[in-house]
């Protein structure tokens, strides 16, 4: 991304998987690998999917669920079922799991993979949640309307000033409450993200509407939760969760008031972006608003919320003194000249810390792709025949722990993505549904904010360590902050 255009910029792209790099070049080429039929099974009708669903959501959790099947099948590619399923979902839960970097990368090849209506698998939340239309994230690149991605292009000149002023407000508020005890960051972070993303993506300032400034994030939360709850594993309150939260899709009317308020806010405050959607991409006014709202709420707000919670929890759990190292780098690079794209791009450790967090905790863990035609899919050790129409499912937290690519894959290594070797590893950082070195375009399905997301997180950390020498985090609260002494 250039310094003058926001990361949501679309550039021409190759949709093919990235070329193999050092650690994979020693692997046998696909043609020399043995052809194997895809192991695993879908089990008995209804019963197989139900057992898999309970293991995935309750008894084992997603990581163990997929790990155990890798061991059982002696393969990172196998057949299994994923939720939702039985009894009231009209979906096919059968998938082919692809759980290593090499097999997963087939999902980026739009020649062989179709991405129509499979954002969260075969289940698709009702289009009532999105104004009775299929928004961009559900479109395949072959559909002409997918070109509308470029509507998101906005000047980035507002980005850093908006970020720093909103962060200053957030930290001032947190500091003022710290004297009376730990301060939860869950609400402040959400308010910050709602305001920051609304302004950067839609040009809409919640400060112009007291209700939005106070409750906008909450309206987003509820609208989002109802769409994705059936697919989110929840360990607590079982079996009630399985019976009441995972057995049927939720009706839109429960959040229609929330959504209408958000719609009115974007309609009133996001005029410039809406007009661009109408004039440059031939969208109707309603189409532009619903799409903008989906990107803002589902893609951006939802993704950032999960990501920042894991970023802060990574800072909390560190026992290696990483805060001091981050602080030193931030002060060295930006101490005198201040925060800019230029200075942050020089902060190798800060960026690596962000990438390593995305590697171990990819905020959107599951990705899906449907075979457009019959093709041969290779893992590191075998080749498999995939039939047209089969649904591939990749679980990124395991994919990005591929021991063929990452040394000591289970461990958080803050400087993993530094130096030459680290830059090469960016070819296998897939959190955005494509390699970090790839290029987002209207002809693929890589996240429109592939660069915007890690840079924003790096700016957040840089701002934090310019303001504070250290912060003490306990659970989801700040318990102390030590103001910068120099
Ligand atoms: C931490 C934050 C984010 C994460 C983890 C994330 C992740 C992803 C992923 C995994 C996909 C691909 C989904 C799929 O089709 O399988 C995606 C798509 C997308 N993301 Fe992001 N995203 C984030 C933030 C954002 C932001 C800030 C924007 C807004 C500019 C954005 C806009 C989009 C759009 C429009 C798509 C659909 C792309 C297409 O249809 O070709 N995302 N995102």
Image: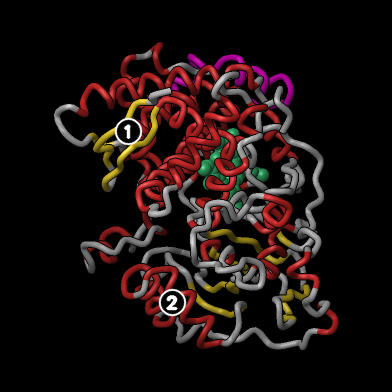
Is residue 438 rendered to the left or right of residue 396?
right
Q: How is the image coloured?
A: secondary structure
In the structure shown, which secondary structural element does the residue marked by tag 2 occupy? helix
Q: In this view, does 165 lie above or below 16?
A: above
Q: Does the residue labelled 2 lie within 8 Å of ligand 1?
A: no
**How far across and how far down the image is residue 199, in percent?**
51, 21
Question: In the rendering, which numbered label is found on residue 268?
Answer: none
Q: Give the range drawn in magenta.
A: 263-284
The residue tagged 1 is: 218
Report the front residue among 265 and 309.
Answer: 309
Instruction: Assign a secondary structure to mark 1.
Output: helix
- Could you tell whether 394 is left or right of 388 in the image? left
User: Does label 1 or label 2 sit earlier along the sequence?
Assistant: 2
Q: Can residue 136 be seen in this view?
A: no
Alpha carbon separation for disc pair 1 and 2? 34 Å
Asked if one can make out residue 79 in the rendered structure from this viewpoint, the answer is yes
- The residue tagged 2 is 49
Q: Position of residue 133 (x, y in %)?
A: 56, 39
Left or right of 428 in this view: 235: left
Give me the residue at 42% from left, 63% from top.
Answer: 89
Quadrant containing the C terminus is: top left
Q: Is residue 341 above or below residue 406?
A: above
Q: Is the C-beta of the residue carrying label 1 under 8 Å from the nearest atom of ligand 1?
A: no
Q: Which residue is drawn at 49% across and 64% down?
A: 411
Q: Callout 1: few (<14), some (14-19), or many (20+) C-alpha neighbours within 10 Å?
A: some
Identify which residue is drawn at 68% across, 70% down.
103
Quarter-of-image position of residue 405: bottom right
């Amino acid at each position: 991304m250039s310094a003058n255009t926001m990361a949501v910029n679309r550039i021409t792209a190759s949709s093919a998987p990235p070329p193999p790099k050092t650690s994979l070049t020693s692997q046998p080429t696909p043609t020399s690998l043995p052809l194997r039929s895809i192991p695993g099974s879908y089990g008995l009708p209804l019963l197989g999917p139900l057992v898999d669903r309970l293991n995935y959501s309750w008894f084992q959790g997603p990581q163990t669920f997929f790990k155990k099947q890798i061991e059982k099948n002696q393969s990172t590619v196998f057949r299994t079922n994923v939720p939702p399923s039985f009894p009231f979902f009209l979906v096919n839960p059968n998938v082919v799991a692809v759980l290593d970097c090499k097999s997963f990368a087939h999902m980026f090849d739009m020649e062989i993979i179709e991405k129509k209506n499979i954002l969260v698998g075969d289940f698709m939340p009702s289009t009532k949640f999105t104004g009775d239309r299929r928004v961009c994230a559900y479109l395949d690149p072959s559909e002409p309307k997918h070109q509308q991605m470029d509507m998101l292009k906005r000047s980035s000149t507002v980005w850093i000033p908006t970020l720093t002023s909103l962060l200053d407000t957030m930290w001032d508020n947190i500091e003022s409450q710290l004297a009376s005890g730990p301060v939860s960051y869950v609400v402040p972070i959400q308010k910050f993200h709602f305001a920051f993303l609304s302004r950067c993506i839609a040009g809409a300032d919640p400060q112009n509407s007291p209700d939005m400034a106070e409750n906008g994030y909450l309206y987003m939360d509820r609208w989002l939760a109802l769409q994705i709850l059936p697919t989110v594993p929840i360990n607590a309150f079982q079996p009630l969760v399985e019976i009441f939260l995972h057995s049927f899709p939720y009706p839109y009317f429960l959040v229609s008031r929330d959504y209408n308020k958000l719609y009115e806010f974007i309609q009133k405050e996001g005029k410039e972006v809406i007009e661009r959607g109408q004039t440059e991409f031939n969208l109707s006014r309603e189409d532009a608003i619903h799409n903008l709202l989906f990107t803002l709420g589902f893609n951006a707000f939802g993704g950032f919320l999960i990501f920042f919670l894991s970023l802060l929890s990574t800072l909390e759990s560190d026992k290696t003194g990483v805060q001091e190292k981050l602080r030193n780098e931030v002060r060295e690079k930006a101490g005198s000249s201040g925060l800019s794209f230029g200075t942050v791009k020089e902060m190798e450790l800060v960026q690596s810390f962000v990438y390593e967090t995305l590697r171990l905790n990819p905020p959107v863990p599951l990705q899906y792709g449907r075979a457009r035609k019959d093709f041969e899919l290779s893992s590191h050790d075998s080749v498999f025949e995939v039939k047209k129409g089969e649904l591939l499912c990749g679980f990124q937290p395991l994919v990005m722990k591929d021991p063929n690519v990452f040394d000591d894959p289970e461990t958080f290594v803050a400087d993993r993505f530094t130096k030459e070797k680290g830059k090469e590893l960016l070819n296998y950082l897939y959190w955005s549904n494509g390699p970090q070195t790839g290029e987002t375009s209207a002809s693929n399905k890589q996240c429109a904010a592939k660069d915007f997301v890690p840079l924003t997180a790096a700016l957040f950390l840089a701002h934090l360590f310019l303001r504070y020498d250290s912060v003490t985090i306990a659970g989801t609260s700040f318990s102390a902050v030590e103001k910068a002494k120099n």
